[in-house]
Amino acid sequence: MMGTMSLGSSIVISKKGAVTLLSNDKNYYPPCLSKKNANCLMNCQSEGNVIKTNGVSVSVSSSFTKRSVLVNADPGTALLDTGRSVLPPNGSVYNGAQSGIGIVNILKGKAFFVTGATGFLGKVFIEKILRTVPDVGKIYLLIKAKDMDSAMERLNNEIINTELFKSLQQAYGKSYQSFMLSKLIPVIGNVCESNLGLDEDTADVIAKDVDIIVNSAANTTFDERYDVALDINTRGPSRLMSFAKKCKKLNLFLQISTAYVNGQRQGRIMERPFNAGDSIARESLIYEDQELISIPNLNVEDEIKLVLESKKSLGENAASQKLKELGLERANLYGWQDTYVFTKAMGEMMIDKMRGDIPVVIIRPSVIESTYKEPFPGWMEGNRMMDPIVLYYGKGQLSGFLVDPNGVLDVVPADMVVNATMAAMAKHVTCGKTEENYIYQIASSAVNPLVFKDLARLLYEHFNSSPCLDLKGRPVHVPIMQLYRSMEDFSAHLWKDAINRSGLNNSGGINKGKYSHKLENICRKSVEQAKYLANIYEPYTFYGGRFDNSNTQKLMGMMSEEEKRTFGFDVGKIDWRDYISNIHIPGLRRHVMKGRGMCTQN
């Protein structure tokens, strides 16, 4: 029978015999916790967890409300808690396979500290671990918020009450909220702040409890300001590693990186780590006029100093654009294609430099797109890398793009990335040290390439069978997408296409001049927007590297058949026609476009 968790009172004994009665008064704060400290840690475990502050034991309640009344009681009174763990409706708990890696059994009871939890991949990870390892320990979620009420609001709106978690909602029914609040603990903080923005008491609680740190926080804008990207993608992992060294029983530090940290490397790219000072440009031995170009050594600390000095010398108005240009300039100098992957690579370097004896795993997914199977096919959030192009094409606003027709778009579904992450986590968490092969590239280009010209054909077939609708409700008929190798040819195509769509050639009448000028401005804006996308994506649409995933395949080989069914990540088995046409594009219009003026269904 299904058990439910009572959110009633609990009694906790302190060292000196005082008793803390957890009441339902959300406005009351325990005498030994200031409002600031109470707001900084909201403990939603059902077992009435004890936090020591200034030598006094305080229990923070399980119902996400700040409540406590201190009363006197006889020493020796036991901890009483009416809240209990919640099981699925059928009363069963998934125990995992008896052989293989032992993913479920290893992760059972482990406490996590997760950054980037409200992001796309972070949510898929949280959903998967709660669904397959319901006996997991507390999951502390670092959430950027002004106070605990705001953090709670984000937790509910961006995680608990979202469609992604509907399988768990259906499984737990009325006990869903209780189950989620018994596991997820929001803590106010920011990877861009000293000590992660945590107050001392909160930091101490997490440091004593956490077994695994998962850093999924990142700024993924390709041309972000250099200072902003450095702060989160490079200094963020550094701050988190500093915190990791304070954790008493940490088993693993897991970094979510990207396969594109490999920069402008060509050919088959192996799963090997970065060491401090590594430079792709130096590796490449770039020659010009038969002479080796002098490339300075890459020093992360020097890059941080450069940014700080640049900000001081620039005025507020000029800072934003200049810092964007500086990021791209520095990335290109050292052999990376943009600020995003450059700063992520330096983040890996900082982890390598600081880790010491802390066991580390680095996950490098390629382009993460909608879920393949779980918790249901096609879930996604926000426009991922290829999605703006897909949508513009489907709506008849873009009929060509700058791309190598024979090039490869390296795509991997989000649920496969999470499955591989959990398998790697379980494999390494018991080792007690960083193993030799700790880099996992979750990518498809080497084992199951999606070629651009094939993708163009799939898009054409899909939008012709399920066309989008224009503002008048009429089907939009699209031509096969034209693929151009040069910006000059692509630009000429854009102007021709924009003029034809706008009717600029046919404008006439008394107000011809004024009307034509307006249409010309519309065309120019459309062309500039498409060229901007092409410039940003060019390093990827002409990318010459193919990501080796030998470590990832070996990891898959260690899994039992049952684990492969539950935590599968064999990208080699993806049918791209089925994924693009029947999973990804329908998911894109359902979850991102919310059906607004989108496609008809057959």
Image (tube, rainbow, N blue to C red):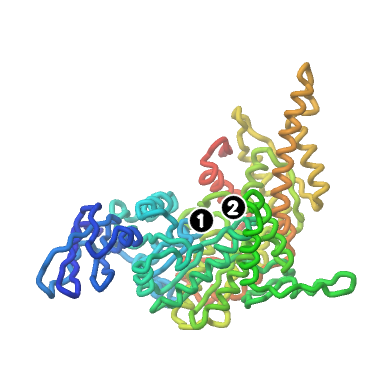
For this rendering, which residue is in front, 199 or 334? 199
Q: Residue lying furthest left in this view?
A: 74
- Residue 95 location, quadrant: bottom left
Q: Is residue 411 visible?
A: no
Q: Quadrant of the C terminus?
A: top right
Q: Position of residue 176 (x, y in %)?
A: 32, 54
Q: Can residue 13 be seen in this view?
A: yes
Compared with residue 103, is residue 131 higher up or lower down, i.e. above or below?
A: above
Q: How far apart are marks 1 and 2 (CA)?
A: 10 Å
Q: Name the residue under label 1.
A: 120
Q: Is mark 2 on a helix, strand or loop?
A: loop
Q: Is mark 1 on a helix, strand or loop?
A: helix
- Disc 2 residue type (three-letter): Arg
The label number, if any, that marks residue 583 in the structure image: none
For this rendering, which residue is in front, 27 or 286? 27
Left/right placement of residue 458 relative to residue 205 reads right
Q: Where is residue 373 in the image (x, y as percent from the top left)?
A: 50, 57
Contact, CB < 8 Å: mark 1 with mark 2? yes
Q: Mark 2 points at which residue?
A: 384
For this rendering, which residue is in front, 360 or 58? 58
Q: Where is residue 293 in the image (x, y as percent from the top left)?
A: 82, 72
Mark 2: give few (<14), some (14-19) or many (20+) Cα within 10 Å.
some
Q: Where is residue 383 in the image (x, y as percent from the top left)?
A: 58, 49
- Residue 177 location, quadrant: bottom left
Q: Quadrant of the N terminus?
A: bottom left
Q: Residue lying furthest right in this view?
A: 289
Compared with residue 113, is residue 506 higher up or lower down, i.e. above or below?
A: above
Mark 1: give few (<14), some (14-19) or many (20+) Cα within 10 Å.
some
Left/right placement of residue 46 relative to residue 19 reads right
User: Tag count in the figure?
Assistant: 2
